[in-house]
Amino acid sequence: MSNFSHNIAPYIKREIMRSYRAQKKGDTAAEFRHLENAHVLGQESTYWHVKVHFLMLRWALKQRDIKEINGQLIRIIGAAFLTAIDGVPIGNTGGSNVHALKVMPISAEHAEIIVKTKRYKK
């Protein structure tokens, strides 16, 4: 696992845990929003990028959202192959409600976390 993948892990895990808590409360919108946050934070790591898309696929299956299911299947394959060659659009939230290659702005909080974790060597 790369330094970045290792260093960003606690922040992604925090968003995944928040997603899980939202699921337990039945708040599917918040559940997916936290997965989107995890996606933005981890999309430069092949491991985390694929894992978050897998979690998004699980969410879509539970919702029986065919568009999201199809979108996540494509995105899992794309994440597995394109992340390693820097082929991901920075800031993209990862859901099928946005084009898979659309670059999007990153919140100040997420940008700060990403910069900090890239600077830090384990």
Image (cartoon, helix red, strand yellow):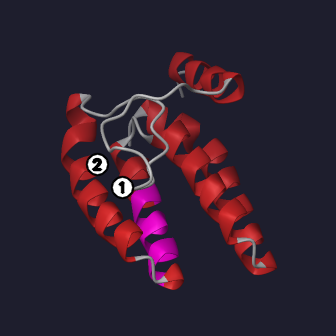
Q: Is residue 38 above or below residue 64?
A: above
Q: Is residue 55 magenta?
A: yes
State which quarter of the image contains the N terminus: top left
- Tell me which residue sits at (56%, 38%) in the image: 8
Q: Is residue 112 above or below residue 5?
A: above
Q: Taking 39 as reference, is 22 left or right?
A: right
Q: Is residue 40 magenta?
A: no
Q: Which amino acid type is shown beneath numbered disc 1?
A: Val
Q: Marks 1 and 2, Cα distance to the nearest angstrom?
A: 6 Å
**Picture coordinates of residue 22, whole percent (x, y):** 75, 68
Q: Taking 58 as reference, is 21 left or right?
A: right
- Magenta residue span: 52-61
Q: Closest to the observer: 89 or 16?
A: 89
Q: Quadrant of residue 70?
A: bottom left
- Tell me which residue sits at (34%, 63%) in the image: 72
- Tell me which residue sits at (61%, 23%) in the image: 111
Q: Residue under label 2, please give it.
A: 79
**Picture coordinates of residue 114, whole percent (x, y):** 57, 26
- Tell me which residue sits at (28%, 48%) in the image: 79
Q: Taking 102 as reference, is 3 left or right?
A: right
Q: Closest to the observer: 38 or 93?
A: 93
Q: Is residue 55 above or below residue 105?
A: below
Q: Which amino acid type is shown beneath numbered disc 2?
A: Ala
Q: Quadrant of residue 54?
A: bottom left
Secondary element under disc 1, as helix, strand or loop, is helix
Secondary element under disc 2, as helix, strand or loop, is helix
Q: Residue under label 1, please give it.
A: 50
Q: Taking 67 as reference, is 117 left or right?
A: right
